[in-house]
Every structure is written in C-alpha cells, then in structure tokens.
Image (tube, rainbow, N blue to C red):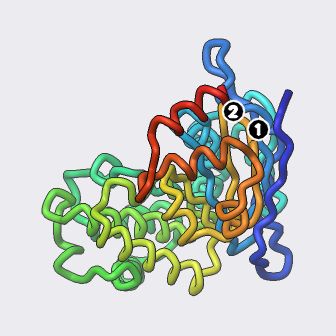
Amino acid sequence: MTSTVTVTSSTTGGPGATGLVVTGLRKEYGGRTAVDGVSFTLAPGGSLGIVGESGSGKTTTVRMLVGLERPDAGTVLLDGRDRSARARGRTRRRARAREIQMVFQDPYLSLDPRISVGDCLDEVLRLHFALDAGARGRRVTELLDQVGLGEREARALPRQLSGGQRQRVAIARALAAEPGVLVLDEAVAALDVSVQAQILDLLAGIRRERGIGFLFVSHDLAVVRHVTDDVMVLRAGRVVESGPTASTLTEPRHAYTRLLLDSVPRRGWDPDRIAEDRRALA
C-alpha cells in the first residue's frame, strides 16, 4: 500500500513556473521501506511543512529531492524538469544543484571551518555564475546584508560566530545559488528560542521578497504553524494527512496527527494518556 495524497500550496508563481511536483517517491534500505509512495506539489513561492516523528521519512524524502539520495521509484519534477534520473555532465549537475538548496540543522558541520564567511559565499558564486571578482564581492555584500550580517562577519571563520550567525551564513550560501526551492531540515531546532524567532522572521522576509518555495522539515509543530501555508504529516514513510496548516493542526482528521499535537507538553498534559494513545495507534 502506498500514499498518494497530494498537497498543493496556495501561493502561485510567475508565468511558466509549475513548481515542484513529487509523485510516488519510494526508498528502501536493506529491505526496510523508509519512504513509501510520497506525493505532493509545492507551487512557486509556496511554503510546505513536512512533519512526523524521528524515523517517519522526513529527511530521507528531502534528501531525494536535493539529489543526496536516489529514489527507488517515483519522480521529482521542478518546473517540468525531471530530477529523478542521474544528471549527465558537469554543466547539468551544476545546474541541478542550483535548483534546490538545503539548509541543515547544524550549520557548523556544513560550513568549511578553514575559510572565511566571505570566501564561502564567493566560492558558490564562482562555481555557478560568470562574474568577475568585483561583481562577486558586491554580491557577497548583498547576500550578507540580506541575512543581517556585515563586513565583520564576512572576515570571520565559522568558529568565531554564534550559532544564529552561522545559520544565517548557511542561508546566505543557499541563496547565493539563486534556487527555486529552499529545503530547511530542522534548521532552527538547535537554536535558542529568541534566535529561532529571528531566523524565522528572516526566512519569512526572504520568501516575500524572492518568491522562493520553502520545504520546512520539522518535528516542532509550533514552528511549522508559524512559517508554512500547508503541511504534510508522515508516519512510517507514508503520508497520513495533509492540507492547509491552520486547519490541519487545529482540527486534525487522522489519529496520528492528533497524537503529535497531544504529545506537546503544556498545562494539563497527561503523559500516561499519550502513551496509551500511542499503544492503541500502534
């Protein structure tokens, strides 16, 4: 049995853009199915949350989208271009890498500790665009300004920055490639609450200004409620519920979605009842 629920984001893009269309994604590891028939559509400029517990298939799904994993079945189309098959040739691989960029949970592990922030961004520009040194320097300044960083941070190494600053650098690096879709995999999970709010406000502004589609992977339903238009709930690699974020997280139809919401600690929270509901669902 496979999941064939389709989520269509409510935001529309420019002429000719069809957005991200994912159909029947499937991935197995050693006989265990990690993702089973996942389908959804993200319109240009839309924002979709992918939620579920650890092991639900969230990260495996987005790793297939960006090309870090190859699906065993299914298709991934971005504006009509097929990303499912292996890209042939350096030019096509670079073009495909630009289309969907990913921001990981721990920016320190994804940044080269040996080079400065400015050089990190310059490296992306040299790889993807035919710009001279002066134009690249101006673009680096623009990117850093867009994420609220300046000349001091441009000269710094990643270890000299705070966690929030490093995550801003990771976002700037992803934006440097001018992607159509930005995947954020637990991108604020490791940050303090106050820093989380700053990063989420930053992302909301970027989405308004740039029209980039967002895929926001998170176990934090409060974050998903804040930054997404639509949500897709995964359990054991399958889509169990999907729809507009506000209605899905307010009046869930599936027992698993209700369990996720009930599992968030709050006044009157009863962990024994949650454990009983989990056993009943299993």
Q: Residues within 10 Å of mark 1 (few under 14, many from 20)?
A: many
Q: Looking at the image, do the residues carrying marks 1 and 2 touch, with CB atoms under 8 Å apart?
A: yes
Please tell me whether residue 123 is drawn above or below residue 75 in the rendered image. Answer: below
Q: Nearer the viewer, residue 211 or 229?
A: 229
Q: CA distance from mark 1 to mark 2?
A: 7 Å
Q: Residue at x 43, y 63 (%)?
A: 124
Please state the horizontal and vertical placement of residue 37, each as a whole percent of the image: 80, 36
Determine which quarter of the picture holds residue 181: bottom right
Please state the horizontal and vertical placement of residue 20, each as a whole percent of the image: 75, 59
Looking at the rendered structure, the secondary structure element under dot 1 is strand
Q: Which mark is residue 196?
A: none
Please state the horizontal and vertical placement of residue 140, each as a whole percent of the image: 36, 78
The amino acid marked with disc number 1 is Leu
16 lies left or right of 255: right
For disc 2, the marked residue is 35
For disc 1, the marked residue is 25
Please state the horizontal and vertical placement of residue 254, each as a whole percent of the image: 75, 46
